[in-house]
Every structure is written in C-alpha cells, then in structure tokens.
Image (tube, rainbow, N blue to C red):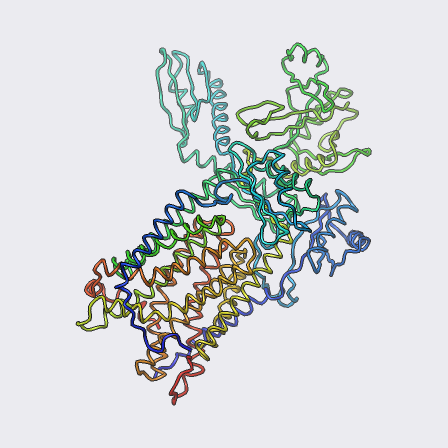
Amino acid sequence: MEFFKRTPNIDFISMRPVTYGISIVMIIGSILLLAFKGLNLGIDFTGGVAIEVHYPQPPDHDRVRDALEEAGFTEALVQSFGSSRDLMVRVMVPEGQNVNEVSAHIQEILRTADPDAEVRRTEVVGPQVGRDLTEQGGLALLFTFIGILIYLAFRFEKKMALGTVLAAIHDPLVILGFFALAQIPFDLSVLAAVLAVIGYSINDTVVIFDRVREIFLGTRKGASSKEMLNQAVNQTLSRTLMTTFSVLFVVVSLYLFGGETLKGFSAAIIAGVFVGTYSSIFVGVALAYDMKLKPQDLLEIKKSDPELDALP
Amino acid sequence: MYQTPPWRYWLVGIVLVAGFFLALPNFFGDEPAIQVVREDRGAIDASGQERIVGFLEADNVPFNNAYLEEDRLVVRFSDVDAQIRARDAISEAAPGEYIVALTSAPRSPAWVRAIGLKPMSLGLDLRGGVYFLYEVDIRAALDQALQRLAQDIRAGLRKERVQYQAVAVRGDTVEVLLRPGASVDAARKIVKGDDPGITLTENQIDGATQLVATFTPERIKQRQDLAIEQNLTTLRNRVDELGVSEPIVTRQGLDRIEVQLPGVQDPNQAIRVLGATATVEFRLVDEANNPYEAMETKRVPIGSKLYMTREGAPVLLKRDLIASGDQLTDATSGFSEGRPAVHVTLDARAGQQMLKATTENLGRRMAVVYIEKKRLAEGEVCKGTRSGNECTEEESISVATIQGVFSNRFQITGLMAAEAQELALLLRAGSLATPIFLVEQRTIGPTLGQDNIDNGIKALAFGALLTFIFLAVYYSKFGMVANVVLIMNVVLIVALMSLLQASLSLPGIAGIVLTVGMAADANILIYERIREELRNGNSPQAAIHAGFDKAFSAIADSNVTTMVAGIALFVFGTGPIKGFAVTLVLGIFTTLFSAIMCSRVFIDLIWGRRKRLTTLPVG
C-alpha cells in the first residue's frame, strides 16, 4: 500500500501567503484567548485542594455543591470525573489558610453528605509550591528551546535552526490557546505533553531539513532554492503523514483508554500532532525560504560531523 | 555486495537475551500483600503467625499464603479488596498490637527471584499511597545558630572577664556592645577566634566599641544543610516507626523534603507523626509554694515555673531539669496497672540524674511535662507561648509521688492509649532539629492505583495493535519486521527500567505508549527511503543498504531534539513528570538501538543473503 505512487509535486512554498495568514490568525487568536479567557490552571499551579470521590451510585452534583457551599466553600468546583459515579472537587485555598486542614474539612463534608463516598485521591498543594512549579515549568520550556536551537545551529545552519524553532514556538502557543478555548484543566502532565510536542514537532521539521541539506549538497547548479525546498517537503511527505498516523494511533488510544488523569495529557499531544505536522510542512521550510536559505549557506559547513554520518 | 558484520549479530543477540531476562519479572505481575510487625518491634514467631492467620480465617478473608520474613509476617492476597479487609480484620481483632503495612510482592517464580531479577518499582499513582512535601524552616535553623553563638560569646566574655553591656541577636547578626575601656582585642578573639565562618565589623557608639558578628554565606549554607540532614534522619526514623514498606525520604532542592509512603491510606496519622515535635521533660514539683497563689498573683517564685495539668489545675515545677526526651534510649507503649503507659529507658547520664533526684526526694512529687511545638496557620490561636508563628504548648501530664528509688527505667502514665503510642514512637525516633511544615500532599487510593495500571496497559495494547496493523498493511513483510522490532523496543524499555529500578508512574506508561508511536517513525524513515531507492532504479540489496545509511542522520537528529525536551523535563520536573521524562529518554535510546541495529540485523538475516532478489516486500 502506498499513499503516493509517485513522489508528489506540490508547490508548498507558494502557499506561503495563505499559510502564514492561517498561522498569524492562530497565534493572535491564542494570545487573545490566553489573555482574556486564560488557562483553566489546575491546583498544581494555583495551589489548592483537589479531591476525587467515587460513589456507588451516580451522586447528585447539586447536593454536593450545596453541602460545600453551606460550609463556606462557595467557589468549589464540582465536576464529573471519568464516569458518572466519580466526582472531582476542586477548591482554591486563599493565602494564609492551612491547605491541609481545608482538605480534611472538605473530606469530612463529603462523607457527611454521603457516607458511601470513597475518597480515591486527594491533592493538596500549597501556594508557594504552585508558584515554584510554574517557575520550573517556564524554565523547562526555555531550556528546551535554547537546547534545541543550539543543537540545530550546530548540526545544520543558523537559518534552518531559526526556521525550525520559530515553527516550533508556534505549536505550543496554539496548544495553549486550544486549552484556553476548551477550558480543559491545565496541570503538570499537560505541561509535560506540551514539552513533548515541541520535541515531536521539531522532529518533523528536522527530517525535512535533513532532506533539504541532502538536496542542496547533492544537486548541481540549475535548480532554484524554491524548487529544491519544495522537493524536500514532497519527498518526505509520505513519511511525515505516516508518522503522524502512527503517533495519532497511540495517543488517541491513550485518550480513550488511559483514564481520566491522562485525558488532558493526551488531548495536548493530539492537538500538538496536528499543529506540529502543519507547521513542519507549511511553516518551517517557508520561513527558511524567506530568510533566503541558499545551498551556499550549507557549503561552508558541509558535512558537519563526518564521524556521525559515517555510522550506518 | 554488503554483508552485516558478525559483531552486530552478536550484539543484537546478547542485548535481546539480556533484555528478555531483565524484563521477565514484570510479566508475572505483583500480588497485593500485607506486612505485619509488632507494635513493640518484637519478633513475630510461629505462634504469632498462627494467631494472625486465625484472625483472617475468623473473618473469612481469603489469602494465598503467609510466611515469616525477618521478624515480620507477610501475607499475600489475590486482590486488593482482600488485602484491605485483612488489614482491618487484624487491627480490629488486636487493636494497637500490630502495625500493618499494605504492600505488594512480586509473583515471579522462585528461580527468577533467586538470580536477583526484580520487576520495575511502581510509583505511588500505580500502587496507592501518600506523598508529602515538607518545607524545612531554614530560617529557624539560622536563628538557632545565632542564639548559640550569642550564648557562647556571653560565656566567653564572662570567663575572660571582658566587661560588656549587651550581647544580642539582631536580624542576621550578633551585636556585642562592650563597656568603655574593655579590651577590644580580647573580645575580638572571643567573638571570632580563628573561625573562618564568622565575619566581624566594628563600630564606635558613645565611646564604647560594638562588635557585629555575621555568618559567612558558606557557614549559613552549612548550618541549613545540617538542619535538613538532621531532619531527614529523624523523618526516616519516624517513617520506619510507621511500618511502611519501601518508603522514600529524600531532599528536594534547597529546603524541601519529599516523603513517599506506598500503601499508606490514612495520611492523617502519618502527617501527625512526621510533623510532630512532641517531647517530654521530667521535673520535680515545687512543694514549698502554693500554685494557686502563684496563678492568682501572677507571681511565680524564682526557680519555678507554673504549668497546668490536663485536669486544669495549676502546678509549680522546679526549673531545674531532671531529664528530657532527647536523653531516652528506648520507649515503648503498653499498659501499667490497666492504664496506658509509655515505658522509657534513659541513657546513662540521665539515669544517674534520675537516681540522684529520686533518692533525695523520696515521698515528694515528680511531674512529666508534655511539650508540643506547632506551626500556626493564619488566625489560629496558640494555647501556649507564641514566638513568631511558632507555638509551644506545655502541659503537665502526670504528677506522681516518688514511691521508690529508680534510675534509668520507668513508666510515664496520664496519656490516652493513642497518645501513649505516638509519644513512644516520637521519643524513639528522635526530635526534629528545625520545624517543618507540609506544603504539598497527595493521596492515591489503592483501587485507583490498580485502575491506573489497567488503563495504562489497555492504552498500550490498543495503541500498539493499531500501529502494528497499520505498519503490516502499509509495508507488508517489512512492516511485520518493524512490528517485531517495536515489541522488542518495549521489552528493552521495561528491561532498562527494571535494571535501573526506576519507578514507573502513569505518565511513565504514557511515555512508553508514546515511544511506540515515535519508534515507528524510525522504521518509517528507513522504509520510505528504501522505497525511494527502489523507485530510483537501485537493486534491492543496494536499496536496503542505502535506505539504512541515508535515513540514519534524520533518525539521529530527530531523536536528539526529542531528547533535549526529555532532559528538560527530567531536570525541572517533579514527581510524575520525572516519570514521563525517564521513559521518554530511555525510549529514545532503545528506539535508536532497535531501529538501527535490530531492524538491520533482521532484514539482513531474512533478505540480505538472497543473491537473486528482484523485489522487496516493502508494500
């Protein structure tokens, strides 16, 4: 079986005006969503109490909410979690209050409201820890970008490295926008997924640039940069789609079967696979073209690492 | 014509065999189990085993087998439900006698265990348990060090007869104000001496010299590290006292301590015990003065201190201490004349003091003071003395007439049974050097843990199956080879995780599932390349060779970039995120090995030797 019997010949570079437009709309939209709607940050980042409760029969959400409200937790969030018989109760704890006592208090309220309630999981995060986690998350994001930029500049060439990283900054931003739009709780595991997506998306772009390098170094004069760049995208198109499918298979299966805790994580990767594939095909190479990437840029460094390339 | 060098066959063969054996224990799975220890740390013998097994049989709790292991009794069950029922049955039948820890035991056959092969250790989210993150009050550690320095300076100045007006701790410094005319040189020697950890500045105030001592940043760091190390030790001791199997107590960053207690279901007892700062002091009662009078006039005689008893009556105790909690060598809880009691053993010095005090004060009364330090939350009232947001509560729990002389062994009464048990535990485990407070707490129930495992495995199986079908359809026989290689990839990840004894979390399973998808990519790159080479008119053998060769740089580059993200996650992530990072990074290594080495070897083995190959089955 083959998607393309012959290598396709699509002029991706000329689609720039359209794809840049789409990307700009997505980026601005994401920024606006983040600014005005904001992420539905989980207690990992805000600090607070989250309690997962299992009931033998589907519980009455309003009753649970009322019981909590009566005790003064007016801002408590009560949601179904996975099945109709599981509830997730989330409460932000104001600074200065003892989070552990609040957690114990809420558990007591839940058990009084329904003696059959089984507390399956509790998470209590102090506000300071939440701030630290946010900071560490930001650092991880920064470290990932800088690390990849350095590696690519060393392995390829500056324009390619910049094109790759710009295409890859676009991806997490759009995922964050998606999470703000859908108001899916954003917790630590979603952050991990976003970082994995950066790795994945760059992975795709890198494969295309690897082909660009090969074509640039192997083609005799005559072909234009544009032709060669298009050729690289087309020749790797089959692989790009295949890999997108195989990754989608596993993450969709994670989304469906991995349980409620992994829902946000897999949703982020699914979103990331789509936007990552899009940006690799339409954005990364186009950016390099607009930065006037020419075969001469590569000739200076030629085979950057003969030892690595000599391996089978 | 290209031939795979023999060393490659050997390498792949050896790695696969080793990987298979290392991964083997994981396929048998775990069995829920309980570990029973006696509350007083005594050994459980055959009759004890019979008794406990009797409790289970009486309650109709089904179990697989029960055996003794290093003074502990281990009982294995088929499911979590029976395990929990067993724990409840034992604690109901013999309350307070045994500590029952929920745990799991590998089900692998004896010969696998005998050669030391262990399954991956499961994270808290897969086996249930509690996770605590404590912050150590390192400011208090510094304050203690400053107070001690001030005390030493005062003593030194007095000894050397250097006259001073005041020695006081102010902020991060100790200020020493000398009297005019006092020897500054001598004072300098006392305050700083040869200590490189102290810096000294001097001011003149109204003709008197003021010396200001500050700790160097290195010394401050050293003090704080010491406080954290001491707290780590105390917490480890306390965790051991709780009877948890495979606990983890580690330092996190500058001032935090992480505690993981697998199998613990009620976090409250653990929180109480781990964070408690309870201790006891033994003091003589001041018989010469009237405590009620002292309470009403608020004038306490010099050399005495006013305490309240549990019943609410005032009592005057002498300030001089006979002995205190940190001089104990052992403490166990039990009963004395039908009342809960803590049996204590003092160390040699305190034993001497106790002997002297009881001999001299026969017929007089002695009191036990129970002291608890707490950290207050906003708005909480302190019933004792407050300093900052730390509250010290002291009460006299028992006042008894000294009936006879005793030295290092005696009992403390006047507590409730649960309190006696906890006090005994705290006295045994030692006290915390600096207060700690809980900043993060996660509890995962045992049924949720099992659900997470089931979900993870289901997701892995389904995702892998879809990928396998897809690859087989799209790349035909070559796709089948890729599938075999993908399975090996998973086996190798599991083998590495078992070898490193890294703990597997739910995000870790997600990392493995994701690796299957990403590892398919490496095979796809190679096969697409082989197809291209065939389309370009190359012979099958040359196409295989060129396909592997040319795909290599793309495989390497793309995996290194993912690895950068994985390392960032590992360095900056905590808990479950680290678990994801570990499988992601290990998965990249195994992917590189299996796609480049294993695929090559298999394809060469099947098609590489056929000289008259005209087509390749790559779909």
Counting from the top left corner in percent of width and height, residue B31 is at 66, 60
Counting from the top left corner in percent of width and height, residue B583 is at 48, 59
Q: In this view, does A7 lie above or below B613?
A: above
User: Number of labelled discs?
Assistant: 0
Residue B67, quarter of the rendered image: bottom right
Q: Is residue B22 visible to us here?
A: no
Quadrant occupied by the N terminus of chain B: bottom left
Which is nearer the eye, A180 or B545? A180
Residue at the outermost left position: A222
Q: Is residue B619 above or below residue A227?
A: below
Quadrant occupied by the C terminus of chain B: bottom left
Q: Is residue A207 visible to us here?
A: yes
Residue at the outermost top position: B297
Which is nearer the eye, B251 or B159? B251
Which is nearer the eye, B95 or B208? B95
Counting from the top left corner in percent of width and height, residue A248 is at 46, 64
Counting from the top left corner in percent of width and height, residue B459 is at 54, 63
Q: In this view, does B10 lie above or below B71?
A: below
Q: Is residue A22 above or below residue B253?
A: below
Residue A277, quarter of the rendered image: bottom left
Which is nearer the eye, B536 or B41? B536
Q: Is residue B384 left or right of residue B96?
A: left
Residue drawn at point x = 75 percent, y = 44 percent: B97
Residue at the outermost bottom position: B612
